Image: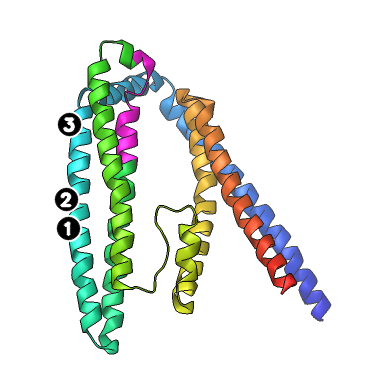
Amino acid sequence: MKTTDKSIKKTNSYLRMGIIMLTFAAVGAVIGFVLINILYGNINGIKTGFSGAVSQIQQFMVPLLLAIMAVSVIYGEVNLHKLKLIGKMILQTEDEECDKWDYEEEKTGAWGTAVNVLSQIACILVLASGYSLKYIEDEHHVNMLAACVIFLACYSYDGLWSVRFVKTIQNIHPEKKGDPSSKNFREQWLQSCDEAEKEIIYQSAYKSYSRTNQWLPALLGITMLGHLFFDTGIMAVITTAAIWLIVTVSYLHSCVVLKRAKLRE
C-alpha cells in the first residue's frame, strides 16, 4: 500500500506539473493573441507617446533630479534622527519593552534603506532618459552636465547616508561589528549578530530568493514582449536572463559550499 501511495503521489506530481505547464502555455498564447489584436495598428502611436514622455523627462531632467535629491536628503535626515531617538529609548527601557522598540528600529531602518535605494534608482532612470550621445550632441551638453553633477551629488549623499545608518545602529548596539566601506561588511555584520537575528536574516534572505525567482521569469517574458512589439532591444532580455542565472547559481553555489563545510567539521 505504501509503495502504491508513493507511486500515485509521484504520478500526480508529474501530471500536475504537466497541467501547470500547459496552462501557462495556453495563458501565454491568449495574452499574445489579445496583445496582438490590441496593439496592432497602435504600436506607432504608443512608441510616439513613449518618446514624448521621454522628451518631457529630458526637458525637466535637472528639476527632477533636484527634487529627488531634496526628498532623499530630507527623509534621510529625519529617518536618522528618528533612529537616534529610538536608540535612546532602547537604552532606557526595561527588557519587557525592548521588543517594541526593536521593532520600531527595524521598521524605521527598513523605510530609510528602501527610500535610499529608491532615490538611487530614480536618479538612474531620470538620467538615463538623456544618457545618449544623440541627446548630448543635440545642443544639450550643458543640461546633461548639470544633470550629471546633481546625479553625483545625490548618489554621494545616498552612499554616505548608508555609512551613517550603519554607524547609528552600531552606536545603539555596540556589539554589531563591521566596516560599511569594506567588501566583507555583510559577513562581519552577520558574525556579530546573535542566533535570533541570524534566523531572521536567513529566513528573509530565502524569502527574497524565492520571490525573486518568481518574478524574474515574468519580467523576462515582459522584456521579450517589449522587444517583440516595441523593439526595445535584446539587451533588456539578456540582462534579465543574466540576473536570473546569477541569482540561481549564487544560491546553489552557497548551498554546496555550506554542505562541504559541514562535511569537513
> Dot 3: what SS?
helix
Q: Residue at x 42, y 26 (%)?
A: 39
Look at 45% across and 78% down and name the residue there.
196
N-terminal of the two: label 1 or label 3?
3
Residue that badge 2 annotates: 74
Q: Amino acid at mark 3?
A: Pro
* Nearest to the observer: residue 127 or residue 230: 127
> Where are the magenta residues, as a range?
121-134
- In the picture shown, does residue 64 fall above or below 180? above
Asked if labels 1 and 2 touch by Cβ distance under 8 angstroms, the answer is yes
Numbered circle sitting on residue 63: 3
Looking at the rendered structure, the secondary structure element under dot 1 is: helix
Q: CA distance from mark 2 to mark 1?
A: 6 Å
Q: Is residue 204 visible?
A: no
The label on residue 78 is 1
Spatial CA distance of label 1 from label 3 is 22 Å
Q: Quadrant of the N terminus?
A: bottom right
Q: Quadrant of residue 122?
A: top left
Q: Residues within 10 Å of mark 2 (few under 14, many from 20)?
A: few
Magenta stretch secondary structure, dominant: helix
- Comes first in the chain, label 3 or label 2: 3
Q: Residue at x 30, y 59 (%)?
A: 165
Residue 225 placement (x, y as % from top left) = 50, 32
In this view, 65 is above or below 167: above
